[in-house]
Image: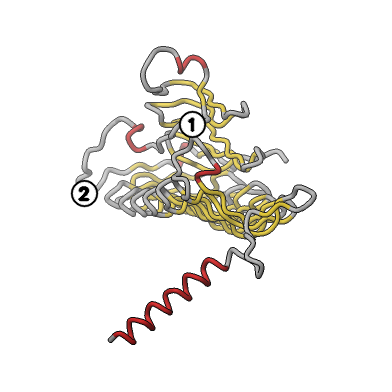
Amino acid sequence: MKKLLYIFLLISFISTAQSQSSEMDTNGKDTINKIDITGKKQGKWIVRGKDKPGTCYPPEGKVEEGLYENNRKKGIWIEYFCNGNMKNKLTFVNGRPDGYAIMYHENGKISEEGNWKANKWVGNYKLYYENGQVQHEFVFNQAGKRDGAQKYFYDNGQIAIEGNFANGKESGLIKEFYENGDVKAEKNFADGNVDVASIKEYQPKKPIKPKSDNPAENAPKIVLKPDEKPNEAATKGKGPIVLNGQHTLYNKSKQITKDGVFKDNRLMEGKAYIYDDNGILQRVAVYKNGVYVGDTQVEN
């Protein structure tokens, strides 16, 4: 028994030593977070809470990690929430996201995933509810516009809307469904315009559970970041900030982060601007009726 215990402890020690040495070279020097003689970041980098004072991250908690090449992010980069759960995993080329990207809700479930290229989604894309159900299934063309079959779902997994888009606009028959699966409406579109004469509306065949008339209850909640401030009208008075009506939000670099109509801190109509760590605009997400409907073109 003592011999087996000794072997187990020896294996554990070797495993720990190998793990620690993976961040050390043969001379025992740290091989991560290196800056070359020209002042450029190179190789493996791990940013921890102690590198971001004033944030919610614990001192040794990971904020993000990945590879640098000549001060530019390269390959897979992972970002974390303060609770340690993964926030996103992005593929970088020449310092900018380019390739497969996956984001997560703070509860650990997937938030969205797809392929990001030249500041836009291309190909198949999915957005998820916090309960893990798919919210949208979109297909984007190489110009970043929705093209082909598009689907929206309720949070119970039942399809809500399905139809085709052509170069960013509704095209052909679009079907809407009740949450119980019954057809709600059928509409024909051409170049994004509905043929009013073609509209057919149906009553549900099965009873529908009543829902609140307040669309804000199901809208994505906007969480104000520590460095994100609304316009002056929203900051008047005491107590926590609650956004209602038209507002524009800015980050510490005075860049617009969100612009539109809010209901109890939820973006109902407008745009959300997403930047990388270098302040370069990566995405402009569009919200309508409290729901993310896609990205608009980003000027390069």
In depth, the one of 59 and 265 nearer the eye is 59
Q: Which residue corresponds to the image point at 67% horizontal and 59% vertical from the top-left?
A: 43
User: Height in image: 229 above or below 130?
Assistant: above
**Residue type marked 2:** Lys
Q: What element carries label 1?
A: loop
Pick the quarter of the image with the N terminus: bottom left
Is 18 drawn above or below residue 170 in the view shown?
A: below
Residue designated by label 2: 206
Residue 79 image offset from top left, x and y in percent: 52, 51
* Residue 265, disc: none
Task: Look at discs 2 and 1 and give the one toward the viewer.
Answer: 1
Q: Residue furthest right?
A: 38
Residue at image position (64%, 51%) is 97
User: On the rendered structure, is 55 left or right of 132?
Assistant: right
Mark 2 → mark 1, Cα distance in angstroms: 47 Å
Marker count (numbered): 2
Looking at the image, the residue that sits furthest to the top is 237
- The amino acid type found where label 1 is placed reads Pro
From the top left corner, tell me how far across and down residue 162 is, in percent. Answer: 44, 51
Q: Which of 293 and 280 is in front in this view?
A: 280
Query: What residue is disc 1 on?
Result: 226
Could you say where residue 82 lies in the image, as x and y percent from the top left? Answer: 43, 45
Asked if residue 150 can be seen in this view, the reply is: no
Residue 148 appears in which quarter of the rendering?
Answer: bottom right
Q: Give residue 292's position: percent from left, percent from top.
A: 47, 41
Q: In which quarter of the image is residue 276?
A: top right
Q: Is residue 255 left or right of residue 240?
A: right
Q: Residues within 10 Å of mark 2 (few under 14, many from 20)?
A: few
Q: Quadrant of the C terminus?
A: top right
Q: Residue at x 38, y 83 (%)?
A: 7
